[in-house]
Image (cartoon, rainbow, N blue to C red):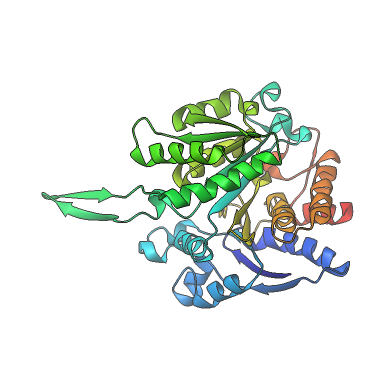
Amino acid sequence: MKIAVLPGDGIGPEIMAQALRVLDFFKAEGMPIEIETGLIGGCAVDATGVPLPDSTLKLALEADAVLLGAVGGPQYDTLPREQRPERGLLKIRKEMNIFANLRPAILYPELANASSLKPEIVAGLDLMIIRELVGDIYFGEPRAIEMRNGERVGYNTMIYSESEIRRIAHVAFKTAQKRGKRLCSVDKMNVLETTQLWRDVMIEVSAEYPDVALSHMLVDNAAMQLVRAPKQFDVMVTGNMFGDILSDEASMLTGSIGMLPSASLDASGKGLYEPSHGSAPDIAGKGLANPLATILSVAMMMRYTFNQDAAANRIEAAVKKVLAQGLRTGDIYEAGTQRVGTVEMGDAVIAAL
């Protein structure tokens, strides 16, 4: 089990340290885990001048799975675009061809009061957002800022091929088959031809999955419905830009983005696993970050790449036990619970394991 570990920037090294403790736990039990570490993001720019060094890309391509912390920080915002940490993240996704991003939004009962919505609206929430990750306006060409008629004009290209839509559709339908057999496809077909094609292909693929109920929703309505009645959804599937926005919105239904893992998979099941949150430079180095999303990303890695469902279940059960014990990092803290730091939360998860 060859795992490339890329701690990244900000709180990345702190939360990664706790995830590595979980991997060490299973390695001590006899799992054949091999770990190699590489640079990505701002720390890579500082060391090498580029956000994704060739050595890191080689490491990622040769590994069975990649575990990533977080990238970015305000000190890099003024760099040329190709040097910014986020470009390293986009490039590694593209080079690994990890086209399917799976981001669960699960509300643990103990955190119902941490959500910004009323408990009765979000209690029992368990939805999966599947985002196409290597196409759409983020990668479309042409793209530029140029001068036209004496003023600056910026443009980007939203583009999807039929085959790109079809392959993410199969992932979404198969995921729905394993859950509640309901799939909602999100588009903006009333004004965007790209997403008219998206809807057409989704309907065509649905014929191969008669046991899954397919519905469609325009993205603006989907954003509203996620806040109004999120439990109506089981699995949602959408393109890269809409998925970026909707999955972050869904994350706050659970009380904290610090609780949400994610998996980005290629056609073979090889994946890049990372917490849904960013590098949080304001709390970096203070021992305050919530490591649970990264630890839960390890659980997703065990399940989706290594087919170690028992290990994944044990990690998730350990997280639930820690929350039931009342331990909370600052992002999910409320009166009557015990505030702990990053390392203490890691201690508790290892103890629960």
Q: Position of residue 308 (x, y in %)?
A: 79, 58
Q: Residue furthest left?
A: 149
Q: Position of residue 287 (x, y in %)?
A: 69, 56
The answer to whether residue 104 of the structure is visible from this angle is no
Q: Position of residue 264 (x, y in %)?
A: 59, 55
Q: Quadrant of residue 31?
A: bottom right
Q: Which of 285/187 is in front?
A: 187
The N terminus lies in which quarter of the figure?
Answer: bottom right
Q: Which of 332/117 is in front?
A: 117
Give the residue at x 78% y 55%.
346
Give the residue at x 62% y 29%.
116
Is residue 284 placed above or below 95 in the rendered structure? above
The C terminus lies in which quarter of the figure?
Answer: bottom right
Is residue 82 placed above or below 185 in the rendered structure? below
Give the residue at x 87% y 69%.
30
Is residue 224 placed above or below 157 in the rendered structure? above
Direction from residue 148 to residue 157 in the image, left or right: right
Q: Position of residue 152 (x, y in %)?
A: 20, 50
Q: Which of 310/281 is in front?
A: 310
Direction from residue 123 to residue 71 in the image, left or right: left
Q: Quadrant of residue 335?
A: top right
| Number of numbered markers | 0
Give the residue at x 78% y 51%.
345
